[in-house]
Image (cartoon, helix red, strand yellow):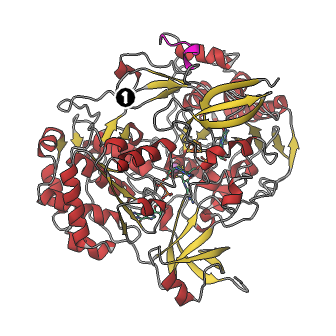
Amino acid sequence: MADTASVFSLCGMCAVRCPIRVEAENGRVTWIEGNPHVPGIEGALCAKGSAGLAFEYDTERPQYPMIRDGARGAGQWRKASWDEALDYIAEKLSTVREKYGAKSIALADRSGIFTDLTKSFVKAIGSPNYFDHDDSCAKNVNMACQSLLGYPRAELGYDFSNTKYIVLLGRNIFESLQVKEVNTVLDGMEKGAKLVYVDIRATVTASKADKFLTIRPGTDYALLLALIHVVLKQRLYDVGFVSRYCTGLAELEQFVQPYTPEWAEAETGIPAFEITSLAHETGAAKPHVIFHGGWMLSRYIDSFYCSRALYILNALMGNIESNGGLIIAKGPKDAGAKGLNSLGKNMPDVADKIVDAEMTNKPLGTGHMVNLFKAIRTGEPYPIRAFFAYRFDPIAAFPDPEAQKKVFDNLDLLVAIDVNYSDTAWHADVILPEATYLERSNILITQKGPKPGFGMRRQAMQPRYDSKPAWEIFTLLAHRMGAGAYFPWKSIEDIWQYQLDGTGVKIEDFDAKGSVSLAKTPILMPRDDIKFPTASGKIELVSEKMAKAGFPSFVPYVSPKKPAEGSFRLTFGRTAVHAHAQSQNNLYLCEIIGENTVWVNDTEAAKLGIKDGDMVDVSSEEYTGSIRAKVTPFIHPEAVFMLHGFGNEVPLKTRSFKKGLRDNLLQKGLLETVDPVGGGVAYMEAMVTVKKAQGGKA
Ligand SMILES: Nc1nc2c(c(=O)[nH]1)N[C@H]1C(S)=C(S)[C@@H](COP(=O)(O)OP(=O)(O)OC[C@H]3O[C@@H](n4cnc5c(=O)[nH]c(N)nc54)[C@H](O)[C@@H]3O)O[C@H]1N2
Ligand SMILES: Nc1nc2c(c(=O)[nH]1)N[C@H]1C(S)=C(S)[C@@H](COP(=O)(O)OP(=O)(O)OC[C@H]3O[C@@H](n4cnc5c(=O)[nH]c(N)nc54)[C@H](O)[C@@H]3O)O[C@H]1N2
Ligand code: SF4
Ligand SMILES: [Mo]
């Protein structure tokens, strides 16, 4: 008879980590579905999550530790045992530490729910240099949100299922997706919510929206200023909420005066009457309105102020801590419960300052990956000589891989801990294969939200290859670095016990549903007593923190540069069936979309003699790549668009090798081009030309 088992866990096919239920038979995972107990999930998975089995049983992923045996990036490796690889790393780290101090060791990861482990590891070995990927993602949005409301972006959840009106600017919610979010948006729309979508091209989200507005690339800030103008002028805002909570209304009123809908029409291409009507309709639906703060929208040089304007609209409409609006995430404390114990709780604080403590963007925080690159490159303010990329692939994720490789030339040690041959792993000195999400357990997580709780990723099968879970890798390394006392755990259960100590929750409590809820009903602060962790305790339309650091709270709109004749702004984004650059080699997913194309506006294509399906050369400064053209009327003429993540250059991933084109190869020279306030990378500032490929055929 078959030996069957079923566990609740968390998906690992992208960084969303949806709750799942996994079945195994005779030690092999045979079935994965969304966790049926979780509202909004109820069995559902996306295509990537469903392709988890193809990932698990793939042979084209790292199977044992590997040590570089040739030049960096040359693809020559020797197989190593774990002891050998970890000893090798520890020896290099010890040399670096002796010469430059522990602070010259840095680690960056994907951030999110499991970072207590990595942050604690870095702390245990005595370095302040923990970084994450957010400069490449939502940093500008995060900073904008904090400057206004005091909370980080991720602590403002969107109550889509109870909303009356959703406005999405470049938030392609049905393709760049999170399963629960998609379902709650659909739920809200079924109950009558209206969806207005603004993008430079027609996406799946555009096709599902009640209204789709095409915008000229990089001009969203103009649209938002005009919306604020109408909302204030026509008094469409929530007067009671604004007078109770907002500082700086008079300054805002004065600032937006020149930005009329007619002015914005000329900038954005969106008719003035559409802008006025959007202001009126959202005003009528307030405070059950969602202006999504944006996400990948935060890719332009002025994205900080653009996102700030989106949050300002939410504040004006009183959409904060309102059903159907933005709800502030609650933690265990808010539910009267004790939180998980941090692994780093008993470790001494690190005296050294993070390497970018004195660099740019200090008013809104440190930890900018881009500053880490600068420090590695220059050795200033002090050298960084060893770098761990854990669950993170900067060479694929930040602009200009060649520039990054030059930066990494300054390192004595580059370690990648991954489940794939990522671009960064391929360029590393050592690859440590982590056990896959189905083969390992992780540390427990805190699930913040209106109903806070704890969650668990639980092992569903033994590792197929010679890989290890992260908690074990970092424990073994800590021991080799003389920090073993801070990592005393022998098993994941030991860690769980430690995390849960004093909470009243037991490991068995996760058996029934995979998570433990700490509140029976959603926790909302009273409408007249919402707490904002800003300097003034209010919503700071005029931010004290920014003023102190010499940054204005409002900046005049600057029209984005128009691409020269024959050139285009290079935009990019996602498809529902792939995750960044990590899934293109998946056996199932590569069958659905196996390579990317470049979208070119049909009128522009006709001028260039390019037909749908032609191979074209796309060029930026010093780099030209070939890709197939998708000629379409559904993109703004100033832009071309590519899916991110294709064009893999690692030959061991045979299904995706050299299929399509890596967008970041074309983002030449942009590695350190960031929004001056938010610090996010301004990827969308790349301009390219498109020509029919030399000898290119259909
Ligand atoms: N040009 C361009 N650049 C971009 C983007 C773009 O669209 N275009 N998108 C940006 C955005 S929004 C983001 S968030 C970043 C994302 O950039 P990253 O955070 O680097 O991307 P991910 O694909 O999430 O994962 C990084 C690595 O984690 C590995 N991984 C996956 N699962 C596991 C696991 O269980 N264990 C371990 N150890 N490793 C694992 C993957 O194989 C991958 O190599 O890229 C940004 N950069
Ligand atoms: N399937 C899938 N889902 C994912 C991910 C994934 O890799 N795969 N990644 C996750 C991550 S890390 C992130 S950050 C999110 C990203 O979620 P989104 O922010 O929704 O990201 P993108 O798909 O990059 O969509 C960006 C959209 O912005 C549009 N755009 C470009 N320029 C402009 C402009 O000037 N104005 C406007 N209004 N629109 C513009 C592009 O055409 C594109 O459709 O997705 C998450 N969900
Ligand atoms: S969105 Fe899809 S791939 Fe990502 S965690 Fe959820 S089910 Fe998995
Ligand atoms: Mo992201």
The type of residue carrying mark 1 is Lys
Residue 360 seen in render: no
Instruction: Specify whether residue 505 is painted magenta.
Output: yes
Q: Residue 414 versus residue 374: which sits nearer the camera?
A: 414
Q: Residue at x 48, y 78 (%)?
A: 633
Q: What is the total number of numbered labels drawn onto the structure image?
A: 1
Q: Residue 386 versus residue 169: which sits nearer the camera?
A: 169
Quarter of the image where one finds residue 653: bottom right
Residue 327 seen in render: yes
Asked whether, in this view, residue 91 is left or right of residue 541, the answer is right
Q: Position of residue 687 (x, y in %)?
A: 51, 73
Mark 1 and ligand 3: say if the CB distance to the nearest ligand atom is below 8 Å: no
Local crowd at mark 1 within 10 Å, few (<14), some, or many (≥20)?
many
Q: Residue at x 45, y 78 (%)?
A: 637
Q: Position of residue 32 (x, y in %)?
A: 65, 37
Q: Is residue 391 above or below residue 623?
A: above
Q: Is residue 25 above or below residue 511?
A: below
Q: Secondary structure at mark 1?
A: loop
Q: Position of residue 342 (x, y in %)?
A: 52, 21
Q: Which residue position is annotated with label 1?
A: 330
Instruction: Specify whether residue 208 is painted magenta.
Output: no
As drawn, the residue found furthest toward the front would be 1
Asked whether, in this view, residue 507 is left or right of residue 166, the answer is right
Q: Residue at x 68, y 54 (%)?
A: 589
Quarter of the image where one finds residue 228: bottom left
Q: Position of residue 242 (x, y in %)?
A: 16, 44
Q: Residue 231 versus residue 68: which sits nearer the camera?
A: 231
Q: Which quadrant is the C terminus positioned in?
A: bottom right
Q: Which quadrant is the N terminus positioned in?
A: top right
Tell me where the magenta segment starts and ends, as one range: 504-510
